[in-house]
Image (cartoon, rainbow, N blue to C red):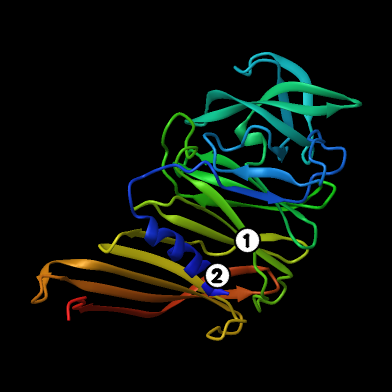
């Protein structure tokens, strides 16, 4: 299971340490919208929830309301229509309409379409009330990610919700997304969001489903952040976050988790493996290749099945070594 997260991050990150460039030709699609969705043009009931785009929610995509949402009739969000959409309602993103200053960041505003009885109605709302990503578990539960901002930590956050197929909230968890604030709509031009359901059992008592949500960008020095979430049919819990970051051959640092079901796992424990390697200044081999310093750390987290929680335990291993590495024969 750890290999899914570790190699996914490294395989994407290392080859992409080059000139920063945005891609606009990759899409992810999932099956989740009901037949009476406002996006009825999709005959096969497949909707494009997320793609690389200039803005987080792509024009023409279908998403969900994740907080009770007041709809406005203008893009400045000043004229209240009196309509409040409930959590779980489907909307279609019609147009990106600029930003509004909110919670210390320039939050994207969208013109949307939604159903009001037999009619399709139009209005405006902002990013923090709607999902920037929607995915479906094999159990048909919906996973939504809504982007926000924590003023105290000065960090972007993701509000993850687990919904039943009818849109009712089963559980939620907030994760930190330590990604840069750039351009007029932060993270719009630099980061993409990814999701994957864990296919293997974690071996953690009480956990019935698990998935991870991550944020990343394919360029040097930009971290990939992964957040695994556990579900026990009552509560949604975020695991210790993991990450990977690299700068070509100069350095890399990554972390991943080992669960009890993994071959190296420990019963009722989560192991956090952290590895880092970087060039050592002013030390070179006879061929002029810099020496490397490699650090390895293993931190144990104790799993509490009854409380469906974990607490940080001991640092089991912490080692560091310097070595010569040369491609020269």
Question: Percent x, y for residue 139?
Answer: 80, 62
The residue furthest right is: 118
Question: Is the C-beta separation of discs 1 and 2 under 8 Å?
Answer: yes
Question: Percent x, y for residue 324?
Answer: 18, 78
> In which quarter of the view is residue 316 placed?
bottom left
Local secondary structure at mark 2: helix
Question: Percent x, y for residue 97?
Answer: 58, 22
Total numbered circles: 2
Callout 1 crowding tier (Cα within 10 Å): few <14, some 14–19, many ≥20: some
Local secondary structure at mark 1: strand
Look at the image and tell me in which quarter the N terminus lies. Answer: bottom right
Callout 2 crowding tier (Cα within 10 Å): few <14, some 14–19, many ≥20: few
Along the line of sight, the residue nearer the viewer: 13 or 79: 13
Decide if residue 170 is on the left or right side of residue 27: right
Label of residue 53 in the image? none
Decide if residue 296 is on the left or right side of residue 207: left
171, above or below 313, in the image: above
Question: Percent x, y for residue 282?
Answer: 9, 66
293, above or below 60, in the image: below
Residue at left offset 54%, top offset 30%: 107
Look at the image and tell me in which quarter the C terminus lies. Answer: bottom left
Residue at left offset 68%, top offset 37%: 61
Q: Which residue is mark 1?
A: 196
Label of residue 4 in the image? 2
Along the line of sight, the residue nearer the viewer: 253 or 192: 192
């Amino acid at each position: 299971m750890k290999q899914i997260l570790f190699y996914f991050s490294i395989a994407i990150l290392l080859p992409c340490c080059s000139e920063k460039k945005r891609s606009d030709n990759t899409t992810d699609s999932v099956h989740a919208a009901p037949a009476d969705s406002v996006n009825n043009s999709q005959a096969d009931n497949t909707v494009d929830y997320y793609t690389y785009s200039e803005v987080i929610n792509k024009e023409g995509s279908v998403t969900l309301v994740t907080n009770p949402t007041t709809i406005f009739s203008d893009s400045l969000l000043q004229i209240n229509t009196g309509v409040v959409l409930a959590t779980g309602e489907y909307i279609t993103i019609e147009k990106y309409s600029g930003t509004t200053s909110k919670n210390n960041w320039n939050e994207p505003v969208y013109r949307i379409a939604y159903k009001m009885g037999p009619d399709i109605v139009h209005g405006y709302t902002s990013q923090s009330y709607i999902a920037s990503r929607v995915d479906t578990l094999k159990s048909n539960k919906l996973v939504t990610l809504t982007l926000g901002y924590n003023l105290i930590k000065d960090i972007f956050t993701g509000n993850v919700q687990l919904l039943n197929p009818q849109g009712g909230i089963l559980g939620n968890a907030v994760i930190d997304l330590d990604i840069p604030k750039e351009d007029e709509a932060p993270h719009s031009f630099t980061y993409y969001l990814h999701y994957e359901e864990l296919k293997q059992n974690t071996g953690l008592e009480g956990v019935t489903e698990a998935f991870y949500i991550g944020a990343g960008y394919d360029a040097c020095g930009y971290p990939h952040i992964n957040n695994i979430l556990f579900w026990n049919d009552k509560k949604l819990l975020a695991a210790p976050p993991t990450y990977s970051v690299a700068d070509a051959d100069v350095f890399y640092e990554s972390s991943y988790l080992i669960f009890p079901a993994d071959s190296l796992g420990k019963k009722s424990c989560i192991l956090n493996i952290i590895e880092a390697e970087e060039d050592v200044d002013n030390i070179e081999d006879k061929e002029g290749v810099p020496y490397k310093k490699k650090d390895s750390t293993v931190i144990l987290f104790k799993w509490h099945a009854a409380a469906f929680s974990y607490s940080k335990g001991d640092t089991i291993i912490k080692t560091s070594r310097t070595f010569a590495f040369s491609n020269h024969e």
